[in-house]
Image (cartoon, coloured by chain):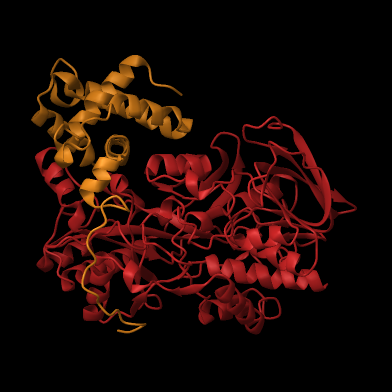
Amino acid sequence: MKGAFHDASQEPLDVEVDVVVIGSGAGGGAAARTLTDAGLSVLVLEEGPYIEAAMLGFKAFDSLNKMMRNGGHQAAIGKAAMPIIQACVVGGTTFVNSAIIWRLPEKVLAQWQKEHGLADGFRANELDDAYAQLERDMFVREVEAANVNGSDRKMALGAAAAGIEHRAIHRNERECKGSGRCLHGCHNNAKQSTAINYLRRAAELGAQVFSHARADVILRENGKAVGVRGTARGNGPRAGMSFTARARRAVIVAASVIQSPNLLRRNGIGRDNDALGNHFMAHPGTSLVGLYKDPVNTWTGAAQGYEAYGLRDTLGIKFESINVPPEVAASRLPGFGASYQKMLERMPHMAIWSAAIKADGVGSVRPSRLLGGDLIRYNMIEADFVRLRQGLKRLAEMHFLAGATEVLPGVHGLPDSIQADQLSVFDSAPLDGTGYGIIATHLFGTCRAGSDTQHSVVDGNLQVHHTPNLYVMDASVFPSNTGVNPQHSIMAIATMAARRLASA
Amino acid sequence: MKFFRFEQQRADIIGRAILPRGTLGGTCDSCDLGAEMARQFSLTPWWSAILTRLGIALVWYAPFFLLGRFGTFAKLGLDEKHKLLDRFARSKNYWLREIAMILKMNACTAGMANAETMTYLGAYDFGRAPAAAPVLLGRSGT
């Protein structure tokens, strides 16, 4: 046992509890904490390892390899290969993200309620109550002035001058030391990932949290979910051995937008449902580099400290400052030879800002024996690229208004570097994914909630249609993408559903 | 998958063309690029590793196919190596551009991920810059 957590490759795991939760990220962590608070016995199964702060480094390749699914080499396949970053550790992606907190926009909730029959399922007052509790428990606040770096300050200047609403990012952290290493996992234990906060609290109240515990089979009797059979992973003496966990009240699948539908499909659940594994949506994003006369020290302070969100409702685009690890950022800089070496020397003067789009493109997820377990098909549509290039033009404009001397578009077919009077080059940027370096981080929709049992996978209580006692509580139940960072909404919706389950 | 010995040697030569000695104040010089790229390759899933393997082979023999010259990448001068890599990076073919980017990323993640380079760049808590003058940030404003 490491701290409050157990390792399935070291300890036996054959138990009977009230609720088995598969996945320890935002959804699983919130559900486990809520159910434990309500007095239920809970077992959390996490496929990945538990990683202590002392084990965290700063090298991008090793961080990805240690903490991400398929070593960070997961990608959606379409016209272009689009990397999809998903953590596989205790805490899930909450362990490696930038802890950005947004409530679900009212418009999105209203759309879900109206178009998916969720007026009774996703009630605003219940969600507001869950949000309020989460914000208290996870110490949500805006980035402190001491942790704001030069890139953040430039974004504040540029957004203000461009007339785009903006703010310091609100994060769930406590006593952040501003080491700039959020994306490698917080080595100060300041970021309130579920591994630090919700799961630890649940474990203190009696929940059992097992790392290296992969769920393979959802056990059912008379159509009801009654437990999970799985396999221990890792390097301990029990690695490769199977385990069985019985669930008296419920099995909750919170394994992510990619793994949740595939786990259901592998178990023959919902195969005749036309929503399972479909309607995959995302917030694909790319970045622009602005070069400034003075150093901006991008790699200090908060990994992401500032955001400009004023184009969310018009273009469906949100801008954020981000400190992509230096060695990864270097690989996206143009050229080779002397010009490239000069560019590398200027890295401390570079502010990297991302643009993430609420894309209308839709894809699918299926199990695959070849590609690390999952086949993801996804393409943005042409309208998404039209909005993306408009957004990049505004982002470049913000850079120049903030004082950038040049901007590096990083788009195939455009100049390597542009000046303030060349913003129109974005009007001819490509209309397909092969011209951009795009990454998808926020994922949605593959087990979407709804009242129509044929066109949705779970109901408003997040229970799988026609399968009593089986629930899905992660972003796969979101009927669409949200336009904002989803962790907070995943936790709020899981909290809401877990409260109902506990009181049922 | 693991590199063959010749692949590690080729990776080292291609990597050093991307990050020549002296880059970033010489902070990347002490890295054995071939060995580190081989370590990373051994930890990479097959579908990604195969692109690296293919990329090394294509770049290695590119002088023959692209320049019509006998000899391999190793026989080119440094400027010619850079021009050749640039042709990959600017190709109309998406996969050739991806190969150039993957090789660049392999070289950078291998060569730059060390405390000396991070200190040189002032990154993370290795080289924290002096605090800038406090600036009041707008709260949800335009």
Quadrant showing the C terminus of chain B: bottom left
Please tell me which residue lies in front, A403 or A456: A403
Q: Is residue B29 left or right of residue A128?
A: left
**Image position, residue A250 (x, y; %):** 80, 59
**Image position, residue A74 (x, y; %):** 48, 43
Q: Is residue A16 left or right of residue B110?
A: right
Residue beneath the point at 36% across and 53% down:
A438
Of the chain colours in the picture, the one used for chain A is red
Above or below, A244 relative to A91: above
Q: How many marks?
A: 0
Q: Is residue A457 visible?
A: no
Image quarter of residue A372: top right
Specify the farthest residue to the right: A222
Of the chain colours in the picture, the one used for chain B is orange
**Image position, residue A395 (x, y; %):** 26, 68
Please tell me which residue lies in front, B4 or A30: A30
Q: Is residue A313 visible?
A: yes
**Image position, residue A342 (x, y; %):** 12, 46
Above or below, A72 relative to A397: above
Residue beneath the point at 30% across and 39% down:
B114
Above or below, B53 relative to A180: above
Image quarter of residue A428: bottom left
